[in-house]
Amino acid sequence: MIARRDVLFGGGLLVAAGAAAALTPRKNVVLLPAGRELESMIPKTIGSWQAVPSDLFVLPKTEGSLADKLYNQTVTRLYESPTALPVMLVMAYGSIQNDALQLHRPETCYAAVGFQISSSRVDAIDVGGRAKVPVRELTATAERRIEPIIYWTRIGDSLPTSGREQRVSKLEQQFEGIIPDGILVRMSTVAEPDEATFAALRGFASAMLTAVAPADRAVLVGTTISGRLR
């Protein structure tokens, strides 16, 4: 005769097995086409800005680190303009977002090299039509440098604005059996962190998305928002 506790124990194992199966991703969803280089997708001239060489960047990875394994492709450029603030653009793309490999948000990267995050808020970039890109705006401060930052992360087709939202998005996609790709898009400058500076960064971000070929925009902001862009 089977004891009741054995039935309950067996049922618990079945539930656990079912949950594990539900959390086992079965499909990779990659928005960057095979063979495409992120570097070639981002124009070197954006509005009045022109890309120039620079080594001023706080980078989301270092050689040989876990982040080095996470990111398949990166773009780092300084854009200068005769009529606007210079902008440092950093993009870091990872073809797999799972429990071991997931995008590092700038709050972590800047703190790791000695910056303090003195402000953080959520905003949105109006890029025309019905499209708005949710972003996080930060101020990173070191002894001799103040760096206003705006950035967004894309996980699959989701644009989470916090670490918690990023984890929830990844978990929701796992429940759907999906391993998504992801990208960090970050723009910053060295200036006073006032509203005019952040407005200039948002203006660059909007101009950059408009300058990217329509077929490539989903890599940066996902299929839903890219479909609304004009």
Image (cartoon, rainbow, N blue to C red):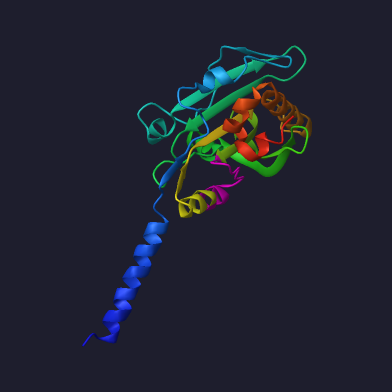
Q: Quadrant of the N terminus?
A: bottom left
Asked if residue 88 lies in the magenta stretch, the reply is: no
Q: Quadrant of the C terminus?
A: top right
Looking at the image, residue 136 sits to the left or right of residue 23; the answer is right
Looking at the image, residue 225 sits to the left or right of residue 38; the answer is right
Residue that protrudes farthest toward the left in the picture? 1
Residue at 74 percent across and 32 percent down: it is 127
Q: Quadrant of residue 212?
A: top right
Looking at the image, residue 140 sits to the left or right of residue 12; the answer is right
Classify 135 as above or below 13: above
Which one is in front, 159 or 17?
17
Q: Quadrant of residue 124?
A: top right
Which one is in front, 10 or 98?
10
Residue that protrudes farthest toward the bottom in the picture? 1
Which one is in front, 31 or 100?
31
Classify 136 as above or below 171: above
Q: Quadrant of residue 4?
A: bottom left
Report the span colored magenta. 155-168
Q: How many marks?
A: 0
Looking at the image, residue 69 sits to the left or right of residue 223; the answer is left
Is residue 174 something one can see in this rendering? yes
Residue at 38 percent across and 26 percent down: it is 63
Asked if residue 163 lies in the magenta stretch, the reply is: yes
Which one is in front, 66 or 147?
66
Residue 165, given in percent of the width and then of the height, sits at: 57, 50
Residue at 61 percent across and 42 percent down: it is 159
Residue 20, given in percent of the width and then of the height, sits at: 37, 59
Residue 217, given in percent of the width and then of the height, sits at: 62, 29
Is residue 189 something one can see in this rendering? no
Residue 87, given in percent of the width and then of the height, sits at: 66, 22
